Amino acid sequence: MNKPLNLLFICSRNQWRSPTAEALWKNDPRFNTRSAGTSPKARKTVSSSDIRWADIIFVMEEKHKNRLIAEFTRMLDYKPVYVLDIPDDYHYMDPQLILELEAKVKLSFVDIHHTK
């Protein structure tokens, strides 16, 4: 059996969007999941160990990708970072947020498999 992929989900404060994504795929045996935020006020702020751990990084907005690049430039050289374009309009486990995450993360996996 293949080793599970490590998926890192990132938003700003690690309150609603990224913890929802982490919870959605947490029990899928194909994945290990973590979530973090880019803000110093995040529940859990993204660290270099999170970046090293991740096989694939999903960010909710372009600004999150830009912050990661600014802080972890070299570490991101060989890491795919996907911008999901999900605005900060939802609460934890909001049904609409779940639908958006499922659709957009699935699309990212299609892109991943087509680029290999």
Image (spheres, grey):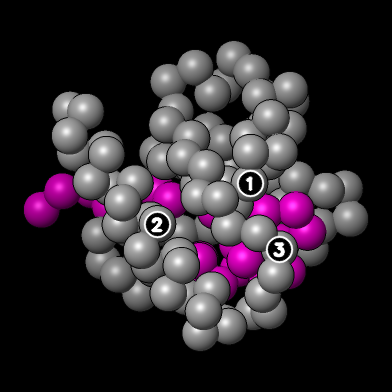
67 vs 50: above or below: above
Query: Where is residue 115 drawn, in percent x and y?
Result: 21, 28
Distance in Å between CA atoms under marks 1 and 2 = 12 Å
Q: Are marks 3 and 1 in contact (CB under 8 Å)?
A: yes
- Residue at 64 percent of width and 18 percent of height: 73
Magenta-tinted stretch: 1-24
Label 2 element class: helix
Q: Magenta stretch: residue 116 in it?
A: no
Towards the viewer: 83 or 54: 83
Is the residue marked by circle 1 packed among few (<14), some (14-19), or many (20+) residues within 10 Å?
A: some
Query: Where is residue 76 drawn, in percent x and y?
Result: 54, 23
Distance in Å between CA atoms under marks 3 and 2 = 15 Å
First reached walking from the N terminus: tag 3 or tag 2: 3
Q: What's the mark number on residue 104?
A: 2
Is the residue marked by circle 3 packed among few (<14), some (14-19), or many (20+) residues within 10 Å?
A: few
Q: Mark 3 points at which residue?
A: 88
First reached walking from the N terminus: tag 3 or tag 1: 1
